[in-house]
Image (cartoon, grey):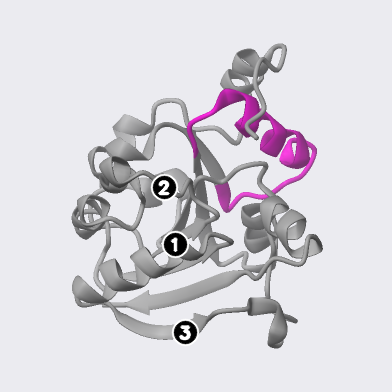
Amino acid sequence: MRLRNVKGAKEKIENSKYVILDYENYKGKFNELFQNNNLLYIEIGTGKGKFIRKMALENPNINFIGIEKFDSVLVRALEKVEQEDIPNLKFLRMDATNIDEIFLHEIDKIFLNFSDPWPKARHENRRLTSINFLRKYDNIFKSTKEIEMKTDNRHLFEFSVKSLTDYDYKIQLLCLDLYSEDVSLNISTEYEDKFHNKGLPIYKIVVKK
């Protein structure tokens, strides 16, 4: 369930050193924001930020941007990082529908963690692994295209495997039950912890093109 009506969320976001407010000005040149030419990874739907925060801390030579459209959720992520110094981490408050208007041939990897499954067939194009979004990603990837996805939703996972492979992505890793394998290098999300603790399987796929 999404958090809503967090008091002062808008103000906290606008005053955070981690949030890029004028992100439209950086299209095609986000490396200038980070002042380096390191790889740039994004997480679409960053939630409360556990995953991307830890990824940034463990990979200081990679730049990370978390994208979240809900103020009330993003502010929870900011609460975890505001007192830290993580120069390779930023956040955007935006809807991923417009992602190809924000980035231009500069992204090296996309993380999709526990995205909204949009279960109804009429909403298929809203799924972040639909052909609608895969075409948008073509315009934001730098060269090699790499997508890493985790979900608890079997239907979304099966849909995504077909959509990605039909779009000529090659499977690098496919897990039907992530926690039945070695997860020593896995970085979990808040949703992932919740679902795993309930005994639900976590599905994962990594593809490249």
- Which of marks 2 and 3 precedes in the sequence? 2
- Total marks in image: 3
Report the residue at 31% width, 41% height from top.
123
* Of marks 3 and 1, the one in the foreground: 1
Q: Which residue is mark 2?
A: 119
Report the residue at 39% width, 52% height from top.
31
- Which of marks 2 and 1 precedes in the sequence? 2
Where 33 falls versus 173 (above or below)? above
Q: Amino acid at mark 3?
A: Leu
Spatial CA span between label 1 and label 2: 8 Å
- The numbered mark at residue 155 is 1
Point out the image quarter for the C terminus: bottom left
Q: Which residues are drawn in magenta?
A: 68-89
Q: Secondary structure at mark 3?
A: strand
Residue 141 drawn in magenta:
no
Q: Is residue 40 visible?
A: no
Q: Which residue is mark 3?
A: 173
